[in-house]
Image (cartoon, helix red, strand yellow):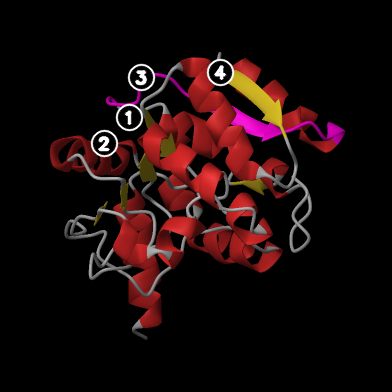
Amino acid sequence: MGSTRFPRKMSADLSGYPIIDWVIRRSKQSKLIHKLVLATSTKTENDYLVERAKKYSINTYRGSENNVLSRFVEVADEEDAGVIVRICADNPFICGTEIDRIVALFLKKKSDYAFNHIPAMGNNYVDGIGAEVISSRTLNKIAAETKNPNHLEHVTKFVWDHFNNFTIQTIKAPVGLNYPEISLDVDTPEDLEYLDNHLDDRIIERTIPESFDVKILLGKINSKRGM
């Protein structure tokens, strides 16, 4: 909620729902995530996020504002979780099916880290519909080896900065989601306006966040880009 570029963005309205509701409701569509936990800081401005999580019967954990890595380590310990799936709260079009695809790959390959939330390593994914998966062993390794503020704030940056020291996996984007040049992140008010402009009444009058087909949105964005 404390974003400098877009204060209180998680409460911002996107076609009738706050962004955090989009993220929660669409994440709940995953069949391979055993338990959802909203991890935020102890700052009072994040009380709103806790209330939204309670509305959907999701557990919450509150920890350090700047040491986000410590939040993940502590939640993993508290939940006795061997595998952690990180879902970005500024990705309203997160897809449960894509979360499950990367989780399944992670479990099959037994890697340290797997991702499909960004276009990288030739996966051709649109930015903002997937997730990151990391083992608790890897989280603890990172916590033990770094005090760099950037690594503490950005949970998986240490993995990317030490790419050759970890087994990293990704997966090719399916047809219809293979738009690496498009970002569906909401980092600024302009990002939100851009997405809202593509969600016209013909799309949203018959849908709710969890049943929204992101391929329709991507098709509209891509067609306008080609004009």
The residue identified by callout 3 is 34
**Element at label 1:** loop
Q: Is residue 114 left or right of residue 25?
A: left
- The amino acid at mark 4 is Tyr
At 43% from the left and 51% from the top, the residue drawn is 202
The correct choice, above or below, for 129 with respect to 83 in the image is below
Q: Which residues are magenta?
A: 31-44
First along the sequence among labels 4 and 3: 3
Answer whether residue 18 is visible to the viewer in this image. no
| Circles 3 and 1 in contact, beta carbons < 8 Å | no
Tell me if residue 204 can be seen.
yes
In the image, what residue type sits under mark 2?
Asp
Classify mark 3: residues with Cα within 10 Å, few (<14), some (14-19) or many (20+).
few
Q: Is residue 66 left or right of residue 195?
A: right
Which residue reaches farthest left?
108
Q: Is residue 2 magenta?
A: no
Which residue position holds label 2? 100
In space, the residues marked 4 and 1 are separated at their CA atoms by 15 Å
Label 4: few (<14), some (14–19) or many (≥20) C-alpha neighbours in 10 Å: few
- The Cα–Cα distance between marks 3 and 1, rounded to whole angstroms, is 9 Å
**Whole-percent x, y for residue 194 in the image:** 57, 66
Residue farthest toward the top in the current orientation of the protein: 57
Q: Are marks 2 and 4 in contact (CB under 8 Å)?
A: no
**Which label sits in the foreground, 2 or 4?**
2
Q: Which residue is mark 1?
A: 30
Q: Where is mark 4, residue-wise?
A: 56
- Callout 1 amino acid: Ser
In this view, the mark in front (3 or 1):
3
Above or below — where is 142 with respect to 4? Answer: above
Residue under the image location 18 percent in, 42 percent down:
105
Quarter of image, res 206: top left
Helix or strand or loop: what does disc 3 sit on?
A: loop
